[in-house]
Amino acid sequence: MNDIIERMRSGKRISETDSDFPRLCEEIENTKRLVVELNTGYHTPDEVRALLERIWGQPLDASVRMFPPFYTAFGKTTRVGKEVFINFGCTFLDQGGITLEDGVFIGPGAKILTEHHPEEPALRHRLLVKPVIVRRNAWIGAGAMIMPGVTVGENAIVAAGAVVTKDVPDNTVVAGVPAKILRKIKE
């Protein structure tokens, strides 16, 4: 199974015709079971972190905090730094790869999406993926959506409800649908 995960972490897609596709489906089912376990009943912060380590396939620093519920279908291409906080009800579609650097805050109900589909109806069943990177100390507001291929810059703030379709420069505040730069961060 590790070879599938490493292929995906390196940006290689596994299509339905790939001989490893059934193993990828098994991994997705395993992740779904872990997500249900995470979202059912009370868990201490250490128990939440232990489940996330299994979902994300990486050891997490003791400073990482999350308030379930949390939703993801794959998990193994999410990378999380230190002092990351993820609030209630977030969704990560991560087959394209999600990186949360140190000190990132994610507000309640935020969505980070690395997966999308072609516009053309005949091709729409295909999955297209692009990575999302959230740089150090960035803050993603409640209900914001970060779309495939976006990098949110260091110290940036994405306002609540924003839909981010383009990269966000360091030290800026963005808001709206689609998100636009409002101003630089106050010193």
Image (cartoon, rainbow, N blue to C red):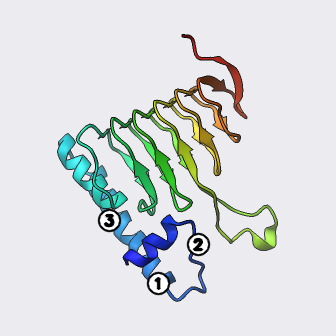
What residue do we see at 28% from left, 49% from top?
A: 60
Q: Residues within 10 Å of mark 1 (few under 14, many from 20)?
A: few
Q: Residues within 10 Å of mark 2 (few under 14, many from 20)?
A: some
Say what amino acid the circle numbered 1 marks.
Pro
Nearer the camera: disc 2 or disc 1: 2
Q: Can residue 95 be seen here?
A: yes
User: Left or right: where does residue 87 sit relative to residue 92?
Assistant: left
Residue linked to disc 2: 13
The kind of secondary structure element at disc 3 is helix
Q: Residue furthest bottom?
A: 19
Q: How many marks?
A: 3
Q: CA distance from mark 2 to mark 1?
A: 14 Å
What residue do we see at 52% from left, 57% from top?
A: 97
Pick whichever of labels 3 and 1 is earlier in the sequence.
1
Q: CA distance from mark 3 to mark 2?
A: 23 Å
The kind of secondary structure element at disc 1 is helix
- Residues at marks 3 and 2 touching, judged by CB atoms closer than 8 Å: no
Q: Position of residue 153 (x, y in %)?
A: 58, 34
Q: Which mark is residue 60?
A: none
Say what amino acid the circle numbered 2 marks.
Arg
Q: Residues within 10 Å of mark 3 (few under 14, many from 20)?
A: few
Q: Which mark is residue 33?
A: 3
Q: Nearer the viewer, residue 77 or 72?
A: 77
Q: Position of residue 142 (x, y in %)?
A: 50, 30
Residue linked to disc 1: 22
